[in-house]
Image: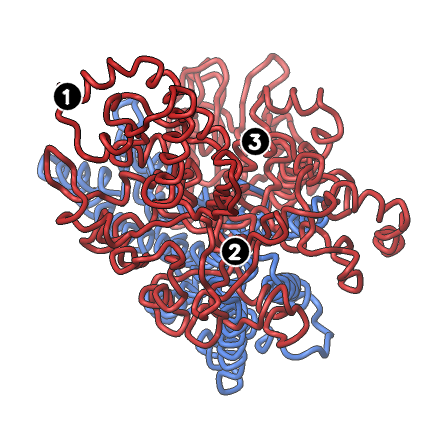
Chain colours: A blue, B red
Amino acid sequence: MSSSGLLTFSNRRYLWWALVLSFASLVVYLSQPPGGMQPPNGGTWQGYLLGTVGAILIVWLSFLGIRKRRYRSRMGSVAGWASAHVYLGLALLLVATLHCAMQFGWNVHTLAYVLMCGVILSGVYGLIVYIRLPMAASQNSAGKDEGLWIAELGSVDKDIQAVAAKSDAETQTMVLSALSLTALGQSIWARLWGLDRSRVKLNESISANRDQQTVIERLATQIPSARTRREAEVLNQLLDLFGRRKVLLARLREDLRLRSHLKIWLYFHIPMTMALLAALVIHIVVVFLYW
Amino acid sequence: MDFLVRQTVAGSETTDTPISSKVLTLGADVNCDIVLPGLDCTLKVSVSPSGMALKSSKKNLSLDGVAVRSAQLSEGVSVEVDGLTLSGFSPPTGFDAGLLIRGQVDHTQKLLADVSHSAQPWSMRRMSWLLVMLVLAIGFLVPYYGAKNPTVAALATEVGLPSDHAWSSGPLSEAHRAAGVELECSACHQDDFVMTPDSACLDCHQTIREHADTVIHSKLELEQVRCASCHREHNEPATVSPRDNALCVDCHRASDQWSPVSEPVHAFAPYQHPQFKANLPRFQDEEWTMERVAIDVDLARESSGLKFNHEVHLDSSRVSFDRSGEALACSDCHTQDSQNESFLPINMEQHCSACHSLAFDPLNPDVQLPHVEPRDVYAVLEGHFMRQFSDMALIQTEAEARRLPNRAKVMLECDGDALVCAKEVAAREARYQFVDMGCVTCHSVEDVGGDNPAERYRVHPVAQQDDWFAYARFDHKAHAEIGERFGDAVCVDCHAATDSSSAADVLMPPIEGCFDCHNADRSDVAVDCVSCHWFHQDEGPRSALLRAESRMRNPNRDAWIYEWLK
């Protein structure tokens, strides 16, 4: 399923469904006259109708997660479900807002609404990254897959170790520690914000080595003061290798950043959906418990 | 302990590194003696009399294909770990041990592992459960058990957890808030899953009555309609009484169903609402009754028993204040009551006597007749003149001194003895007051004839109407200023007092005047049915009683709910 297919599936069939649903909800809502028996709210027959539709939508939208895992299901394609999920999920925002007639307070009813908004907003974020990031990711990886970039990095690192063996103890410590202390996508937050927490051991202390810059600068300053030609050669080779290493790491880090954005919203979307289902049940039970 | 570590990598030079340490450490950690980027464990090499021992932080050493955690690096033994082969070699002089490391750790594996491990902020499943439990506990369990058990509620409040107030779907109306009803949800929500019963409302609203006579309109079963079916709470904006005209008009549009109590009504607009009907007092068979008459018909004449000319009293050229010369204002006589709807009754002493003095004897202008029944008035007259004629000489002197007008002289003309004269003059004065000028100026007086002046004059009883429209209410205060008009200008806009020369004129305004501002056909200032009318009548049995009886007769009214819940 391509990202654009999510929106254009079956000639935007579900966009029309969502528009029809939204329009129908508006008509139902507006049938509550302003000076009527009671002001528009969830307790009029229109309110009950919109609430029922909203509740059914929420439960049905939640089923996408289950449908996705039932690979043998014949209940429509996953692509169709996802497309309907997007459009009807957006329509839900209107249905629920009309159901509650914009009446909010510090109560379990508004809690359900807020959770629903959280779910929909995280979903919208997911949709945006789903549409935009794959393109950015493929541009970043320049047609190669991640494994190839890692293999190239591995080969650079082997070369660095081999060259470092020819250098003096201090340079060797710096270079090997820079390899050892290279941080790449260790925490989700580092991935999300593209943080580089790489470090290096310099003069018996650990310093930051963002973008391998500390090592590169140190090597560059060492070259002019090399005592032998061989030493200068070794330092030059190391500088060259770290330059490549820097580019490779940046690419991998960007790739991780993009891919983590593709996933992070789900960590909000799914737990909030479950909390929403709980709040929805409470909302419905409580309305009739205190009828 | 002095170690010599020799590292050889295929295609590269061999490097020797001397390390002086009790235990030689190797690993990815930069604090190790030998840093091996990517090594998945920390290796420790120590020397004992029995030889060189290798120990790993993980059980990942491979000794002849067997995974071990430690190994003795005696001669001929080599251990493999993470792509490295470690073995001992005879060290040159000056060293205690020699460690040979061949090969290279594949750093890629570590990077690949770093990159491909699924970094997640939290476990989706665990977070889902946590949130569900949290929502259930805070949103339902704590409030529910708090509602059942005050101790739980108190504890919850203590630690800032919600009570069943968190279930409220909106604010209560101002009246219920002020009355403290909102403090206790169970005041209205008495049983779980059961709609608020009428008894919850009628506990407080004990004087409320049904909309109509439940005997005459028994088919409507008014007492079976739940209070809360109209009075919805927790609305926004907070209102408890519906103002929906359709609620009234749906029934009252019927042309003949409610006659004569109510005529067909569709809206407050021309031709859609009946003309106002005033309650006019009628004196028949020695008692007052009220007749409801549409005020735009000829029959709509008032018969209060009084004579009064508004036109004269409001004309400054004829009636004005002595000092200022200003005309009377409406409010000089008409004082609003505290409800802002009616006016306090007009009262002779307070409103009329300043001009209409009840003095009758020019010789004694300070002596006034009492404002009482004719018989008592005559008794006062007789007594007064008896005192006067008992000292005739004084009268003459006073009369000369004061240059009395003719009336006084004529009044006192009498030749008989004091008793006879006193009676004659008193009778003459009574006739003057009741027939010519005096009491008769304001009152209707009937002369039934006869010789006894105390009995021959009958003053017509007086009834002042203070509630012209018994089935409607009106807020005078809200109408005290209209646009830039205020004061009497506004009063006479509706009440045509300046043109009224008869007390029989009904000065209540007809409905057409209201339509200037309030008209359902235009988007003017809206008035609902309940702006002027009220739903619950103020006559008949109280709903509290009626509905309790109805419930006793039909105790299983809500039984279906329980059945359904089961």
Q: Secondary structure at mark 2?
A: strand
**Disc number at residue B220?**
none
**Residue B57, position as x, y percentages in the image:** 59, 28
**Residue B176, position as x, y percentages in the image:** 56, 37
- In the displayed structure, B79 sits above or below A93; it is above
- In the displayed structure, B437 sits above or below A269; it is above
Judging from the image, mark 1 belongs to the subunit labelled B
Is B487 in front, or is B351? B351
Which quadrant holds residue B242? bottom right
Q: Which tag, 1 or 2, sits closer to the chain's start?
A: 2
> Which residue carries the number 1 mark?
B400
Residue at horizontal 52 percent and vertical 47 percent from the top: B448
Is B383 in front, or is A5? B383
| Amino acid type at image mark 1 | Glu
Q: Secondary structure at mark 1?
A: helix
Q: Secondary structure at mark 3?
A: loop
Mark 1 and 2 residues: CB-CB less than 8 Å, in contact?
Answer: no
* Count of picture labels: 3
Specify whether residue B490 is in view: yes
| Amino acid type at image mark 2 | Asn
Residues beneath discs 1 and 3 located on the same chain = yes
Is B127 in front, or is B55? B127
| Amino acid type at image mark 3 | Ala
Report how far apart the C-alphas of labels 1 and 2 lie in the structure.
Answer: 55 Å
> Which residue carries the number 3 mark?
B179
Compared across the picture, whether B565 is left or right of B144 comes to: right
Report how far apart the C-alphas of labels 1 and 3 lie in the structure.
Answer: 75 Å
> Which residue carries the number 2 mark?
B279
Badge 1: residue crowd in 10 Å (few <14, some 14–19, many ≥20): few
